[in-house]
C-alpha cells in the first residue's frame, strides 16, 4: 500500500495537489502510487515557468525505463515555479514523491478539476494495486 | 489468466511487480530496475526464466532432423556445447531464435522463446517426421533460473561440484546444484558471464533460496524482466517480436552468419535464403544513442531531414551509457543527421554499431 497523505488533494490521473487552502499557489506532483507503477523515473518534462495552463491539460511527461505517461494540470493558472531539481535528478520522483519530487507551482485561477480527497484516492488505487 | 511459474510465491513474497509476458505471470522488477541492472553489470543478478520453452529432440537421427529443421549445422555440434540458431519458414522468415544444446550423441535440447515455443515444438514435430527422432516439449516440467554477472561463477561454485572454470561459454554440463540435478549452462542474455540452470519445476523454489543465500555476500539481487530487457539491449542482443519476426530473414537482421549453407542436405528455407543471401538488405539493424534525455521506444519512426528512414525496434534509458539508446532498422546509407520522432518532436540521435556494451573479458 503506497503512501497517500491526508492533507493533499488528488486527481484520477495520479497527480497530487497541495496548498489549495491558501488560495494563492498550488504545488503539484505525482503520487507514490504512480511513481511505483512507473518504476525508475528517468526523465521529467515540465511546463515552462510563466506559461498558463488549464485544468485537465496535458502539461508535461514522466518517463521511466518501461513507459511514459503524461502529467495533467489539476488546476489552472499561471505556472510560477518549476522544480529544476527534479528535472536534473528524476529519481526524486521515486524517492520523495510528495517532498523533493514536487513538479511545479501554479497561481490558481478558476475552479480546479474534480479533485479527490485522500480517502477517495485511496479507494481509487486500492482496487488495482 | 497468465500462467504462473513455480516461483510465483517467491516473487510475491519479495514484493515483485508482476506482469503478463507472453501469457506468463512474470516478475517485472522487485525494487528498482536500475539497481537490478547495475547489480548484473557489477555483481550478479538472479532471474526466473521458467517461461522459456525446453523442447527435446532425441533418437538416432536427431542431429539430421535438426539440420533439416533449423538453419544451423547442429550435427557438427560437439556434445556438451550449445549454439545460437534460428528456425525459419519456407520463405526464410524467422519463426524464432533458439539456443540448441547437444546433451548426447542422440539428444538435443532446443530452448525457445516463451511466446513461440508451442509453435516451435509443433514445427519441429512436423519437420522431424521423416527422421528416426522424437520431439518432446518438456517446457512444463522444467524451471529455468539464471545467475548472471561477474560474480556468478563464485556464487554458483559454492553450491556445486561441477568444474565451472572448465565450462566454456556456450557449453553445458549435467551437475548437482545444492544437491539437485541440473543442466548447468554457461549461457545468458545479459552481455555478462553467467549461468543458466535448467531444473525440475519442483526444485525451483529451494534452488532459488540457496542461490539467494549464496549470493548475498557478493551483492546478488533478484532481477526482473525490465532489467533483463535493458541488459540485452545494451549488449545488442535481438529480441523476438522486436528485432526479429517472420517478416524478416536472418540476413535482414544482420545475423546471416547463423545460416549454414555448407551443411549436408536440404533444410527448411534454404532456397529462399540462398536467393537473398547476397542482396544487401534495404534496411540494416543499427544502434542509436540519443543526444537528449527523451527515450526512443519500440515503433517510433526514425527520421532524416523530416523523412522517415527507419523504425525503432527497442529503446530504453541505458544505465551504462547514461543516455537513452535504441536498436532500429534504418535505411542503408542513412548514417548521419538521424532523429527519432518522439511523440511529435524530432530528437537527434547518433548512429553507432552494435553492441552498445561489451564486457571486459
Image (tube, rainbow, N blue to C red):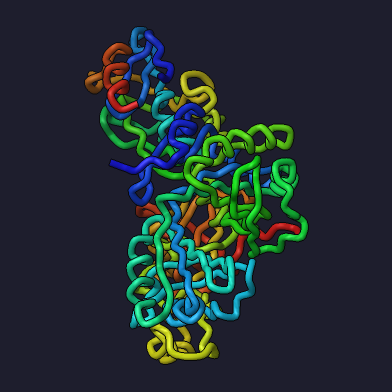
Tell me where residue B244 appears, x and y as whole percent. Answer: 42, 67
- Residue at image coords 60%, 64%: B355
Quadrant where the C terminus of chain B lies? bottom right
List x then y, in percent, for residue B79.
63, 71
Where is residue B93 shown, x and y percent of the image? 37, 76
Residue ID at (71%, 63%) = B168
Left or right of B242? Residue B349 is right
In the rendered image, the vertical position of residue B72 relative to residue B302, given as above or below: below
Q: Is residue B271 above or below residue B155?
A: below
Number of numbered labels in the structure image: 0
Q: Residue A74's quadrant in the figure?
A: top left
User: Residue B121: which quarter of the image?
Assistant: bottom left
Q: Tell me, yes or no, if residue A77 can be seen here.
A: yes
Residue B327 in picture, x, y percent from top left: 49, 62
Q: Residue at x 37, y 21 (%)?
A: A16
Residue A48 seen in the figure:
no
Instruction: Decide if residue A55 is on the left or right side of residue B318.
Output: left
Give the camera-side residue of A78 and A97. A97
| In the rendered image, the vertical position of residue A104 relative to residue B41, given as above or below | above
Report the quarter where the N terminus of chain B lies: top left
Amino acid at each position: 500500500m503506497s503512501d497517500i497523505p491526508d492533507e493533499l488533494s488528488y486527481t484520477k490521473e495520479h497527480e497530487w495537489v497541495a496548498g489549495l487552502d491558501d488560495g494563492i499557489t498550488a504545488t503539484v506532483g505525482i503520487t507514490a502510487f504512480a511513481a511505483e507503477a512507473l518504476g525508475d523515473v528517468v526523465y521529467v518534462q515540465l511546463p515552462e515557468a510563466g506559461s498558463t495552463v488549464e485544468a485537465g491539460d496535458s502539461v508535461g511527461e514522466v518517463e521511466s525505463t518501461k513507459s511514459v505517461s503524461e502529467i495533467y494540470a489539476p488546476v489552472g493558472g499561471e505556472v510560477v515555479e518549476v522544480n529544476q531539481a527534479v528535472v536534473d535528478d528524476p529519481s526524486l520522483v521515486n524517492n520523495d514523491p510528495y517532498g523533493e519530487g514536487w513538479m511545479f507551482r501554479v497561481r490558481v485561477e478558476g475552479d480546479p478539476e474534480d479533485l479527490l480527497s485522500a480517502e477517495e484516492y485511496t479507494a481509487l488505487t486500492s482496487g488495482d494495486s | 489468466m497468465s500462467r504462473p511459474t513455480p516461483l510465483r510465491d517467491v516473487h510475491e513474497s519479495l514484493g515483485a511487480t508482476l506482469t503478463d509476458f507472453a501469457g506468463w505471470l512474470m516478475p517485472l522488477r522487485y525494487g528498482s530496475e536500475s539497481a537490478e541492472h547495475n547489480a548484473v553489470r557489477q555483481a550478479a543478478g538472479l532471474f526466473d526464466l521458467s517461461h522459456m520453452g525446453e523442447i527435446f529432440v532425441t533418437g538416432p537421427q536427431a542431429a539430421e532432423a535438426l539440420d533439416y529443421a533449423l538453419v544451423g549445422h547442429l550435427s557438427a555440434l560437439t556434445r556438451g556445447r550449445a549454439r545460437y540458431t534460428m528456425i525459419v519458414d519456407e520463405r526464410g522468415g524467422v519463426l524464432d531464435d533458439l539456443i540448441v544444446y547437444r546433451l548426447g550423441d542422440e539428444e538435443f535440447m532446443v530452448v525457445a522463446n516463451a511466446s513461440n515455443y508451442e509453435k516451435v515444438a509443433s514445427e519441429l514435430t512436423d519437420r522431424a517426421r521423416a527422421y528416426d527422432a522424437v520431439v518432446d516439449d518438456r517446457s512444463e516440467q522444467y524451471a529455468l533460473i539464471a545467475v548472471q554477472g561477474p560474480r556468478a561463477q563464485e556464487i554458483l561454485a559454492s553450491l556445486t561440484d561441477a568444474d565451472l572454470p572448465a565450462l566454456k561459454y556456450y557449453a553445458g554440463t549435467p551437475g548437482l546444484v545444492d544437491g539437485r540435478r541440473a543442466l548447468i549452462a554457461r549461457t545468458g542474455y545479459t552481455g555478462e558471464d553467467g549461468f543458466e540452470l535448467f531444473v525440475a519445476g519442483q526444485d525451483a523454489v529451494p534452488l532459488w533460496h540457496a542461490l539467494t543465500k549464496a549470493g548475498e555476500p557478493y551483492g546478488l539481487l533478484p532481477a526482473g524482466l525490465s532489467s533483463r530487457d535493458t541488459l540485452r539491449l545494451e549488449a545488442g542482443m535481438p529480441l523476438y517480436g522486436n528485432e526479429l519476426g517472420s517478416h524478416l530473414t536472418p540476413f535482414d537482421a544482420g545475423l546471416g552468419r547463423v545460416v549454414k549453407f555448407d551443411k549436408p542436405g536440404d533444410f527448411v528455407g534454404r532456397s529462399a535464403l540462398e536467393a537473398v543471401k547476397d542482396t544487401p538488405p534495404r534496411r540494416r539493424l543499427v544502434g542509436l544513442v540519443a543526444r537528449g534525455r527523451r527515450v526512443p521506444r519500440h515503433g517510433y519512426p526514425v527520421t532524416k531531414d523530416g523523412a522517415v528512414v527507419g523504425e525503432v525496434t527497442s529503446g530504453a534509458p541505458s544505465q551504462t551509457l547514461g543516455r537513452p539508446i535504441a536498436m532500429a532498422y534504418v535505411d542503408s546509407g542513412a548514417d548521419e543527421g538521424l532523429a527519432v520522432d518522439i511523440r511529435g518532436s524530432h530528437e537527434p540521435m547518433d548512429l553507432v554499431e552494435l553492441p552498445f556494451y561489451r564486457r571486459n573479458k
